[in-house]
Amino acid sequence: MNHGRLDLLPPVYGARARIRLANRRIIFSAMGVAVLLLVLVFHARVRRAGAEDQLSIARTLAEKVIAAENLESQLIQEIEESRIRIEEWRRVALPLPIGRVLITMSNAIPEAVLLDRLQIDVTGIRTGSRRERSIDKRLLCQFEGMAPDEQTVRLLVEQLRDREPFEEVRRGFTALDETGPTLKTRFSVSFEIDLTKPSCVVMGGDSE
């Protein structure tokens, strides 16, 4: 006697049941895949956000490094410019007191002469060939004034020529001045002083 289970449903119902079961499995599998994809997408977004944060931090650090390098370059340039200015100041710095030069000049000026304009400049005259960098530093002085006559102006020029440290003493212009009660001679005189060699500045009042 056969004690097996007897299925009285038509075969078509069994096929439909198997199809529904297969559809459920497909749906569950699709849902699992979708959930897995969502997890992967979320993880990828989290990693992307972390990478963007790291990139932003790296960019900020790079900008700070570049700013520090620019600041260093600027400081180096400022130091170099300061060094150049100091060197230029040293090149034009007067090796002798200008006040003593004026006193020496005044000792050679006759008492009847009145000065009303004095101009002093420092210049560098390049000497030698182009490959050489030697510079003859000279003090250029020009003054104007009033004298009783041209003879007094000639005497002034001769006295300056006989004194150190005056060089290249030259008389400029002379002209009669009739603005006062007596005729006077307006004149100009220029001279140079070589700043590259020691000079003896005369302090005594030995004018003629």
Image: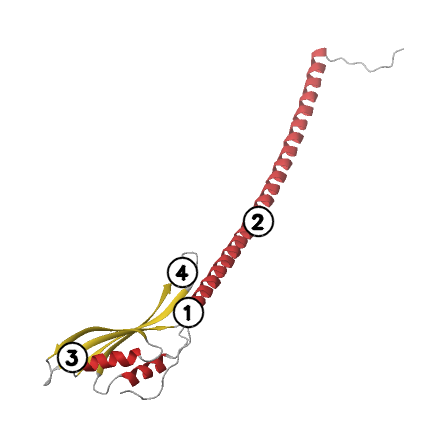
Residue under label 3, please give it. Answer: 185
CA distance for labels 4 and 1: 23 Å
State the SS at label 4. loop
Q: Is residue 14 left or right of residue 137?
A: right
Position of residue 180 relative to residue 42, above or below, is below
CA distance for labels 2 and 1: 46 Å
Residue under label 4, please give it. Answer: 128
Question: Which numbered disc, 4 or 1, marks the residue closer to the eye?
Answer: 4
Determine the residue positioned at 59% across, 41% down.
48
- Kindly identify the amino acid type of the residue bearing the numbered disc 1: Trp
Question: Which numbered disc, 4 or 2, marks the residue closer to the eye?
Answer: 4
Q: Position of residue 208 (x, y in %)?
A: 26, 87
- Kindly identify the amino acid type of the residue bearing the numbered disc 4: Gly
Q: Mark 2 near mark 1, Cβ–Cβ under 8 Å? A: no
Q: How many marks?
A: 4
Q: Is residue 161 left or right of residue 87?
A: left
Specify the label residue 89 is tagged with.
Answer: 1
Q: Position of residue 3 (x, y in %)?
A: 87, 14
